[in-house]
Amino acid sequence: MPATIKMIAEKAGVSRGTVDRVLNNRGDVNPATEKRILRIAKELGYTPNQAGRALAARKKGYVIDVILCSLGNEFFDDVKNGIARGMQEAENYGIRVNILEMKGYDVSRQHELLDRAGEEADLIVLNAINDPLIISKVKELKDSGKETILVNTSLECNETLASVCVDYIESGATAAGLMGLMLKKQADIVIAMGSKNVLGHNERVVGFINNIKKRHPEYNIITTFETKDDEELAYDTMKQVLKAHPETSGVYITSGGQRGVCKAIEEAGRYDITVVTSDGTKTVQEYVRKGIIRATVMQEPEKQGYEAIHAGVYYLVYGELPDSKPALIRNEIYIEENL
């Protein structure tokens, strides 16, 4: 016999109206009672009325705000394609999804967008800058009842509902493993990272350096510089690095700025430098085919965009994350032959 609201109410010791409010996200229920009801419903295998859920969500008129550090960064084109797929799903429940874009990693600008989202949205999907001000704002939003799902990033706090991203340490370690397979016994390596304010970029660097030290202690890390995911800055800085360090034999690019770095290497005629990077943007594919980039570690950006919205929609409609809750996206290796 399928579980009913009456059965849940009897086992929880509450009225059917209370159970109905919890299962349909209508609020005004003690948090402890709500948690108990949801647990009992799960234990009994309660299957909600899908049509009823959709109708309740439509009446609510939920809003999801998506904040992305995406302007001028082609990587996010695929992330936004995934978000667009999620938006189609959201429309079935009358949920509106807004995309708020910013350029680079301006903490004050992201804080401003979070303020705006806090006023208009019921849930936020955030490509977060790892900064105390942003962390504090995420906590503040949670305290006000508004959850945050991270996309293509991680954050040094436990106040987010979920995070849809790769294992960045593993990504960096994988890049180091690839470089070790291609370089000679002695190598001088430069790291071009996106931003020190992005936890994932830092974790990639940590994973890369730790694996190099473990497997190739004879290698030398010459310098690490930030591209800020800005092509001009990446180009200018890489030119200076090559001039100061002609011994450079390997370059690891953690995120954006690939065109700038590769353009500087190409103009210098340094086809002897082994370049390993992340992602599979059109720029990366172009330089793989030119022989500048030897390998890249992918992270399924379209899937990240979709999974973040899917999780947000499911949470607003059902009050919990889907059974297949967002998990780490796979790191995949691509070279010219399989790109």
Image (spheres, grey):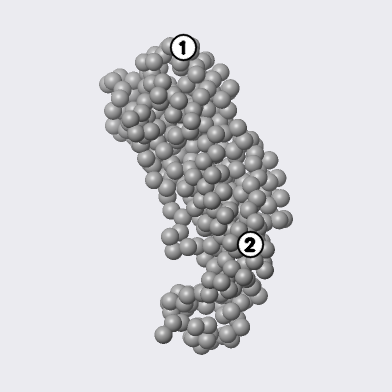
Mark 2 or 1: the one toward you = 2
| Callout 2 secondary element | loop
The residue where tag 1 is placed is 268
Q: Which residue does the image show at 28% across and 20% down from the upper left?
A: 184
- Assess whether mark 1 and mark 2 are in contact (beta carbons under 8 angstroms): no
Q: Tell me the quarter of the picture where residue 220 sits.
A: top left
Q: Crowding near pointer 2: few (<14 within 10 Å), some, many (20+)?
A: many
* Quadrant where the N terminus is found in the figure: bottom left
Q: Which residue, given by chain and number where applicable, does mark 2 sit on?
A: 94
Image coordinates of residue 23 in percent, x first then y, are 56, 74
From the viewer's perspective, is residue 37 above or below residue 232? below
The residue lying toward the viewer, choosing from 33 and 44, is 44
Q: Nearer the viewer, residue 247 or 336?
A: 336
Residue kind at label 1, given as amino acid type: Ala
Q: In percent of the image, x 67 and y 63: which residue is there? A: 61
How many marks the image carries: the answer is: 2
Residue at 29% in and 32% down:
215
Which mark is first along the chain, 1 or 2? 2
- Between marks 2 and 1, how big is the CA–CA gap? 54 Å
Above or below residue 204? Residue 190 is above
